[in-house]
Amino acid sequence: MGKHSIGRVEAFPPGKQSLVRVAGRTLGIFNINDEYYALHNLCPHNQAPVCLGDVGGTLLPSQPGEYIPGMEGEILRCPWHGWEFNIKTGSSLFDPAVKVTTYAVTVENGELVIEI
Amino acid sequence: MNAVAESLTVGEIASRGRETYRIIDCDVHHAAPDMAALQPYLPEPWRSKIVNSASHIGGLGYLSPAGHRRKDAIPPGGGMVGSDPEFLHRQLILENKVDLAILTGEMYGWNMHPNEDYANAVVQAFNSYTIEHWLEPYAQHFRGAITINSNDPHAAAAEIDRLGARPDMVMVIMGATSTRPYGQKYYHPIYAAAARHHLPIGVHPANAGVGIAHAVTAMGYPRTFFEYHTGLSTLFQIQLISLVAEGVFEKFPDLQFICIEGGVSWLPQLLWRMDKNYKTLRADAPWLKRLPSEYVLDHCTLTTQPLEEPPDPTWLLYIFEMIQAEKTLLYASDYPHWDFDANHVLARLPQHYKKAIFQDNAARVLRL
């Protein structure tokens, strides 16, 4: 376990999706309304580089015939097979136990710090 | 930073315990950058018509929420995925350590265009484009499939005769959707031509419910891409039943069919149901001399992608046993489409299956 600074917060504005190399791992860094999230760039399905996928919204659980768009900007969709993950938790939308590994991100003296 | 390097490539997967076999990928979708790229190979009036998208087949409006193509396979210069030979060669052959890719294209569904003269010209042009831009420059790693318009069997046979002697063309490919079942006499000129050139016939889903096709299913049109895509296995079931029942494999004893991208695990049920019915109903097909399942297992192979992913991966081994996977399965990635398989289930296979599926079966059927 260690703390790793990955740069000034200004380099990670809201909506930006970045890849950084930390402690031998490639992480995707996401800023959702100035909350920061770090996800391992490795899909639990077939080890695809999941953080290269599109970020967007999804359709929320609903009744048959009902369409409820939501979670805009909070869903990462793997570039290979299109599995959807909640960026805030790393969990897939079809089974919360199927997850991309997440890492704690804090802001210290204006720097983003990842704990690995 | 190289994010992709963290992913296991299919080459690395296969090479675990690898002895001395090649990886042959039997379904790689190359494409022309745009229809204008086919113009040099088209006579008029088709040369002018091809660049007008209103002259194409159209679609049904099914939209995959994930998109239809692998997002990281867009060439660096932009354009269609699969349309840049150099980039495809780098991403699939070099980075994934595939030894030989069978280029299947994306044009086999033109059999559902209402104008068969136009469709014939387009598939011929695409074949010529493939030879000039893909097969000849990359002779070491690419082999081709002769795309035909199966809806005009005599023209299709002529195209097979035009290119069938080329050593770099190792397969004929046609769409899995047809206006009548593929076993029927109407299509036999295609099979005679393929047999003349010792070429197997690949069948790939395309344009189900589109153009002059019947409805996507016998129940009409499902609402979503999820339903449409899951149901594609049924195309192969209908076609295999017909090929067996019409005696195609008695009439063409060396003919091989390859079911591409239809899945695998439905096959045992089909074999057993046919065999059971045949015992009572054999007078419907008195020309058959063996059980239906025996024809299928001797004359048909299936590509692995999209391989089913059961909750317990070892269950696939039971299916493999039921379908004699050591002789009936061929590895395919479906690069660069969304349901690409760099498949970890294959990595856990016993060694004899890996050698057979990655190399031996394709080498036998495609005469590589």
Image (spheres, rainbow, N blue to C red):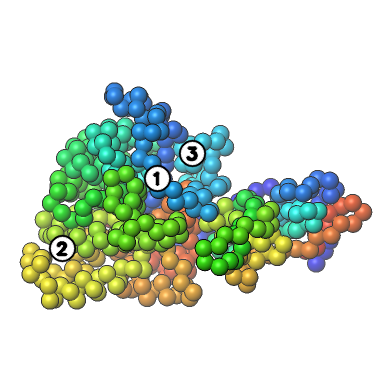
Instruction: Assign a secondary structure to mark 1.
Output: loop
Q: Secondary structure at mark 2?
A: helix
Q: Amino acid at mark 1?
A: Gly
Q: Which residue is mark 3?
A: B80
**Disc 1 and disc 2: Cα gap in Å?**
32 Å
Amino acid on which the number 3 mark rests in the picture: Met
Q: Are marks 1 and 2 in contact (CB under 8 Å)?
A: no
Q: Which residue is mark 1?
A: B59
The answer to whether B324 is drawn above or below residue B6 in the figure is below
User: How many C-alpha atoms fall within 10 Å of the one at disc 1: few (<14), some, or many (≥20)?
Assistant: few
Q: Label 1 lies in what chain?
A: B
Task: Return the mark for residue B150.
Answer: none
The first of marks 3 and 1 along the sequence is: 1
Chain bearing mark 3: B
Between residues B248 and B49, which one lies in front from this camera angle?
Answer: B49
Which residue occupies 23% across, 48% down?
B199
C-alpha separation, residue under disc 2 versus residue under disc 3: 40 Å
- Counting from the top left corner in percent of width and height, residue B51 is at 40, 28
Q: Are marks 3 and 1 in contact (CB under 8 Å)?
A: no
Number of residues whose C-alpha sits closer than 10 Å to that of mark 2, classed few (under 14), some (14–19) or many (20 or more): many
Relative to A11, B95 lies left or right: left
Judge whether B162 appears above or below B351 on screen.
above
Instruction: Looking at the image, tell me whether mark 1 or mark 2 is earlier in sequence order.
Output: 1
Rendered location of residue B221, percent (x, y): 37, 56
Q: Nearer the viewer, mark 1 or mark 2?
A: 1
User: Do the residues marked 3 and 1 share a common chain?
Assistant: yes
Q: Is residue B247 left or right of residue A21?
A: left
